[in-house]
Amino acid sequence: MGNKAQPSRGEIQLGEWLVTPEWVQSYVEAVGDSTGNCLQLGLVPPLALTACVLGRVLETLELPGGTIHSLQEVETLAPLEVGSRVAGVARQDPPRRRGGLDFTTVSYTLTGPGGRPVQRGRTTVLIPAPGASLGESPRRRGSAMTGPGQELTPVVKTITQRQLDKYCEASGDHNPLHWDTEFAAGTGFGGVIAHGMLTLAFISEMMAASFGQSWLATGSLKVRFKGAAYVGDEVETWGKIAREEHLGNGRRVTCSVGVRNRQTRSEIISGSATVDLPDGPAGHRPADQPAKV
C-alpha cells in the first residue's frame, strides 16, 4: 500500500499505490453499493480514494482511539481508472482546541498517471480530551430536510457489525469506536458506531444511481457529520436538487443531501453534492420507493 513518512512541517507523504480491481471490489462490498456503476465503467469510486487517504492519515498521525470524523470535503478533478497507480500528499493544519476537544484538519491532493490531479479534499477530526463530554447523544440530534426541487431516490441501509469489520479492512481505519464494544461503551457514544466515511458512501451511492458516470467523473461533496449510526440502526439518504447553473457545454447541478436515522429521524450527515452534466436530458432519476439493501 505504498510508503509512509512521518509528517514534516505539516506535510504528510501518503505514498504511491496501485488501485487494484480486487481492492475496489472489496470496497464496493464493504459499503454495500448495489449500483454497480463503477465496476461496469471501470472507474474508481471517489469515496474509495477518500477512505484510503483517511486511513493512511490516521495511521501516520497515530491519533488515539475515539477520534471522531467531523467535516469532509471531496472534489473529483478527473476520473481514475481501476488498475491505475495513484499518489498522494497531505498537509496538516496546526491543531486547535475548543470545549475540551482538539481539532485537526488535513488537506490532501491525489494524482494519477502522468501526475494528473484526480482528487483533492479536506478532512477535520476531533480528538476528545480524557473525560470530555461529547454533549447530547448523537441519537437524539436532528434537523429537518431542506432544499427545494426534485427529490433523488433514497438509499436505505441497515448497519451491521460484519459490514463495519469489512470496512475496517477495506479502508485501513481500525478506530476501536467501530469494532471494540468495551472501548466504545466507555466513550460519549456509549456503543459501537459506523465509520463516518461509510455512511457518507451511502450518499455517493445515491448520487451515482441518479447521475451515473458524471458523478464518478466530476462529483464533489461538502458535508458535516452531525450524529452517528449504531449497529442495528436503519438509515436512509435523502437528496434534493437545490440549483442548476449553465456551463459552456452543460450544466452544474447542486443537491442538498444527507443521511438520517429512519426510526428517530435524527440527522447523521448533512451537506451538499455537486455534479457536472453534459448537454441533454437531466440524467437524474426522480424519487421513488427506496430500495432496501
Image (spheres, rainbow, N blue to C red):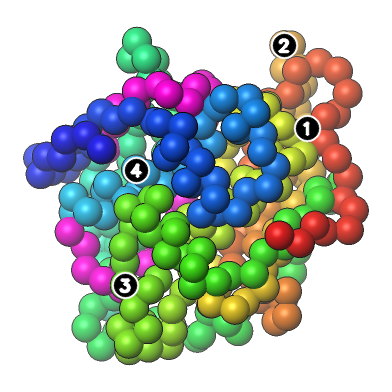
Identify the mark at residue 53; answer none if there is no mark: 4
The CA distance from mark 3 to mark 4 is 18 Å
Q: Secondary structure at mark 1?
A: strand
Residue 63 magenta: yes
Q: Give the residue at x 15% y 40%.
A: 4
Describe the element under mark 2 as helix, strand or loop: loop
Does the magenta-highlighted stretch encompass residue 67? yes
Q: CA distance from mark 2 to mark 3?
A: 48 Å
* Among numbered discs 3 and 4, the one appearing first in the sequence: 4
Tell me the distance, in whole angstroms, between the alpha carbons under discs 1 and 2.
Answer: 13 Å
Callout 4–callout 2 Cβ contact below 8 Å = no
Using the numbered discs, state the Cα–Cα distance from disc 1 to disc 4 in whole angstroms.
30 Å
| Nearer-N-terminus badge (1/4) | 4
The residue tagged 3 is 176
Label 1 sits on residue: 244
Tell me the amino acid under the disc marked 4: Val
In this image, 13 relative to 66: left or right?
left
Density class for disc 2 (Cα within 10 Å; few <14, some 14-19, many ≥20) is few
Residue type, label 3? Pro
Could you tell me which residue is drawn at 44 percent across and 37 percent down? Answer: 22
Q: Which of the two labelled residues, at mark 3 and mark 1, occupies the earlier sequence position?
A: 3
Q: Name the residue carrying label 2.
A: 248
- Amino acid at the residue labelled 2: Gly
- Position of residue 59 measured from the top left corner of the image (x, y, whole percent): 22, 54
Frontmost of labels 1 and 4 is 4
| Secondary structure at numbered mark 4 | helix
Residue range highlighted in magenta: 62-90
The label nearer to you, 2 versus 3, is 3
